Amino acid sequence: MPKIVDHDVYRRELLNKCFDLFAEKGYGSITMRQIADGLGVSTGTLYHYFPSKKALYEQLVEEINRQDLLKVAAELEGTQTLQERIEACGRFLKKNEDYFIKQTFIMMDFCQNNDPQEIKSNPVIKLTIERSLQAICELLDFDDRALAAFIMTHIDGLLLQRIWLKEEISISEQFVILGEMIAMYLDKKKLCYEEKP
């Protein structure tokens, strides 16, 4: 009897294994043949699931974004206050720092090897940014997209600082400060709204 393959599950397994290959070699340097060899599959199998390296990368970005948002949501379960939720996000980032640094390298390499306009208009990248902004608003229980974008920018900058300065920047301290800043910002915004005639 022939083996029944769940193609969606198998595609996700291939994507998960691709992450380390992209992190090790870089988007610009790795070829589909090297990816196939690294995964232990034929190039035909790889092309069956991913018509190009760019398509593979885009599906990888979408998959890791989906998984990351599920994991951070699980990490925040049981938190009550905004400060607790933000500090839980910091713990999640610290616990998975190496993974997020690899992710940063992969994204930077992709950006270096593609046209900036194409990246800006890429539907997968736009979707993952939109999904991330929405998740930040939902997980932290506010409806301020500019604030969500600020938090994303802070996290991206924090990861870059960790790459450059290693242990000199404390993720925990940064998230405590971030939580305090956001709480003050939201309180001030609420007060201004209440004072309007």
Image (spheres, rainbow, N blue to C red):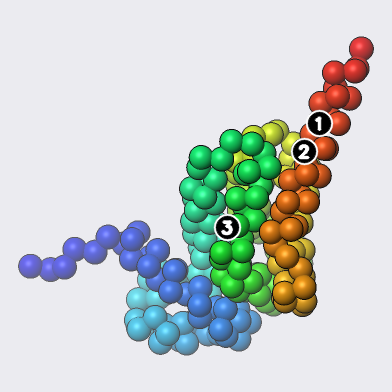
Q: CA distance from mark 3 to mark 1?
A: 26 Å
| Picture disc at residue 187 | 1
N-terminal of the two: label 2 or label 3?
3
Horizontally, residue 77 falls left or right of residue 136, namely: left
Identify the residue position indicated by label 3 in the image.
Answer: 92
Q: Relative to 139, is 155 on the left or the right?
A: right
Q: Quadrant of the C terminus?
A: top right
Query: Which of these two is toward me, 108 or 193?
Result: 193
Q: In this figure, which residue is indicated by the disc labeled 2?
A: 183
Residue 28, position as x, y percentages in the image: 63, 82
Determine the image quadrant of residue 185: top right
Residue nearest the observer in this picture, 8 or 105: 105
Res 28 label: none
Residue drawn at x 51%, y 65% is 60
Q: Amino acid at mark 2?
A: Ala
Question: Which badge, 3 or 1, comes first in the chain's sequence?
Answer: 3
- Other residues around mark 2 within 10 Å, as few (<14) / some (14–19) / many (≥20): some
Amino acid, disc 3: Phe
Whether residue 101 is visible here, answered yes or no, is: yes
CA–CA distance between discs 2 and 1? 6 Å
Residue at 54 percent of width and 45 percent of height? 76
Give residue 141's quadrant in the image.
Answer: top right
Asked whether residue 123 appears in the rendered view, the answer is no
Q: From mark 2 to mark 3, how far is it between C-alphas?
A: 20 Å
Q: Quadrant of the N terminus?
A: bottom left
Q: Where's residue 42, x and y in %? A: 35, 83
